[in-house]
Amino acid sequence: MKIYFSGSIRGGQQDVEIYHEIIEELKQYGTVLTEHIGTKIKKNNMTDQEIHDRDMNWVIESDVLVAEVSTPSLGVGYEIGRALDMKKPIICLYRSINGKTTSAMIRGCTDLQCFEYATLEEAKKILKNQLTH
Amino acid sequence: MKIYFSGSIRGGQQDVEIYHEIIEELKQYGTVLTEHIGTKIKKNNMTDQEIHDRDMNWVIESDVLVAEVSTPSLGVGYEIGRALDMKKPIICLYRSINGKTTSAMIRGCTDLQCFEYATLEEAKKILKNQLTH
């Protein structure tokens, strides 16, 4: 199984450790195409178009998209929208931060599987349920 | 012409005045379906699903999507992704904030018309060029 993990690159650097843990967990279930999301931003020489096209090719190639949607992100929202139109299964995980949950557009989309979690253990249980049944 | 204006609801409340000005400008060119984006959040009794489905119906109905993408937003990214798959023309406007511009996934997508602006006058000129030619 090929898994596209989607998380906020620029806004979510405080969450990079959580992304890393989720990615490590996902590796039990398949190949994670976007392992770099779980490490701090490194400079690279890719243009925006190269990044976009690489990531879209990975979305196309993937069997499932797993998105961490606690942090607002244009890229994550865009990838969810595109993957939805490709009929990919999409699992969205989010935490409550300062009493706020994720976007109404995400939670209100019945084609997504959205789950709130508080601890990493809860997130792992959700992923196990979703990816092994 | 029916115009869907997309802006960050939760993260972009500091930008609501800019959204309002852009919406007022857009009214010259057609009907803006999402005029509420240009006013402060008001409580309503709609469920997330009702909000999602209403907004998606407006995207479907629209002739063009205009997105202000200076502020990270899952909803705005999602709407751009969905509208792209519907082959809608999409105009993205963004400012540089603290030296950062908008997401690489947005700027790197060659199917979007992306423009940086600094002043509202510049934004108005871009819209005029895009919507009248």
Image (cartoon, coloured by chain):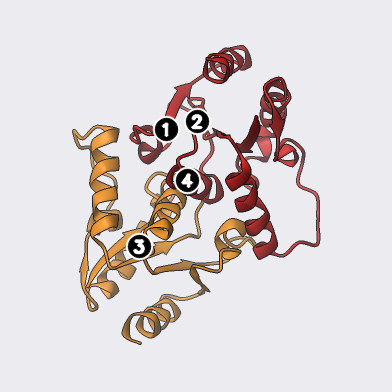
Chain colours: A orange, B red
Considering depth in this image, is A56 or A33 the residue closer to the camera? A56
Q: Which amino acid lies under the numbered mark 4 shown in the image of this protein?
A: Met
Q: Nearer the viewer, mark 3 or mark 1?
A: 1
Question: Could you tell me which residue is drawn at 55 percent across and 60 percent down?
Answer: A106
Distance Cα–Cα, label 3 vs label 4: 31 Å
Mark 2, residue position: B92
**Which chain is indicated by disc 3?**
A
Residues beneath discs 3 and 4 located on the same chain: no
Where does the C terminus of chain A fall, quadrant-wise?
A: bottom left
Mark 3, residue position: A19
Q: Nearer the viewer, mark 4 or mark 1?
A: 4
Distance Cα–Cα, label 2 vs label 1: 7 Å
Residues beneath discs 3 and 1 located on the same chain: no
Question: Could you tell me which residue is drawn at 70 percent across and 40 percent down?
Answer: B34
- x and y percent of residue A100 in the render? 63, 60
**In the displayed structure, does residue A4 sit left or right of residue B9?**
left
Task: Work out whether residue A26 can be spotted.
Answer: yes
Label 4: few (<14), some (14–19) or many (≥20) C-alpha neighbours in 10 Å: few
Label 1: few (<14), some (14–19) or many (≥20) C-alpha neighbours in 10 Å: some
Q: Which is more N-terminal, label 1 or label 2?
A: 2
Q: Which is more N-terminal, label 4 or label 2?
A: 4
**In the displayed structure, does residue B82 sit left or right of residue B132?**
left
**In the displayed structure, does residue A133 sit left or right of residue B68?**
left
Where does the N terminus of chain A fall, quadrant-wise?
A: bottom left
**Which chain is indicated by disc 4?**
B
Which numbered disc covers residue B86?
4
Mark 1, residue position: B112
Quick one: SS at disc 1?
A: loop
Q: Nearer the viewer, mark 2 or mark 1?
A: 1
Label 2: few (<14), some (14–19) or many (≥20) C-alpha neighbours in 10 Å: many
Considering depth in this image, is A105 or A37 the residue closer to the camera? A105
Task: Work out whether residue A34 can be spotted.
Answer: no
